[in-house]
């Protein structure tokens, strides 16, 4: 969705995805444990879907008997976020195609 908002052409979207994706992965705890981050970054990470994904997967792997036990809120965040992003992404992409046809 962010790529379609800032790109001028459809070919530019993949570069913008990488520009947004790598910082989100770092902030989400994909490379470093999130416990190393200061409190201000932890507050920002709560809005990061990659943070919720890593927490949910970690809890599911550590508790195979009850995979959604502690990570139920992470699962619901991911489900709502995915639904919203698919809808917003579809609308944004349609808007981008309409604007590109006018050029």
Image: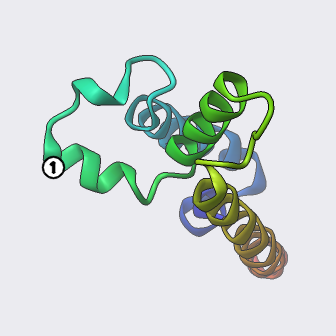
Can you say which quadrant of the picture contains the C terminus? bottom right
Colour theme:
rainbow
Quarter of the image with the N terminus is: bottom right
Q: Quadrant of residue 99?
A: bottom right
Q: Nearer the viewer, residue 31 or 33?
A: 33
Q: Which residue is at a point 78% across and 81% down the rendered structure image?
A: 91
Residue 78, position as x, y percentages in the image: 68, 58
Residue 93, image x, y percentages: 79, 70
Q: Is residue 87 or residue 95 the one in the foreground?
A: 87
**Left or right placement of residue 101 versus residue 66 in this view:** right
**Residue indicated by mark 1:** 40
Q: Relative to 68, does residue 5 appear above or below in the rendering?
A: below
Report the front residue among 59 and 97.
59
Crowd class of label 1 (few under 14; some 14 to 19; many from 20; radius 10 Å): few
Residue at the top extreme, as displayed: 31
Give the tally of numbered discs: 1
SS state under label 1? helix
Q: Where residue 54 sits in the image (x, y, percent)?
A: 58, 34
Quarter where residue 61 is shown: top right
Give the residue displayed 53% in from the left and 62% down from the top: 6
Q: In x, y percent, where is residue 13? A: 68, 49
């Amino acid at each position: 969705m962010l790529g379609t908002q800032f790109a001028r052409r459809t070919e530019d979207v993949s570069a913008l995805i990488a520009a947004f994706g790598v910082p989100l992965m770092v902030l989400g705890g994909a490379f470093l444990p999130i416990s190393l981050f200061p409190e201000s970054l932890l507050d920002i990470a709560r809005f990061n879907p990659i943070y919720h994904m890593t927490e949910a997967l970690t809890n599911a792997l550590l508790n195979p008997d009850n995979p959604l036990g502690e990570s139920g809120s992470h699962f619901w965040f991911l489900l709502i976020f995915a639904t919203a992003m698919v809808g917003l992404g579809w609308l944004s992409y349609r808007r981008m195609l309409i604007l590109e046809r006018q050029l």
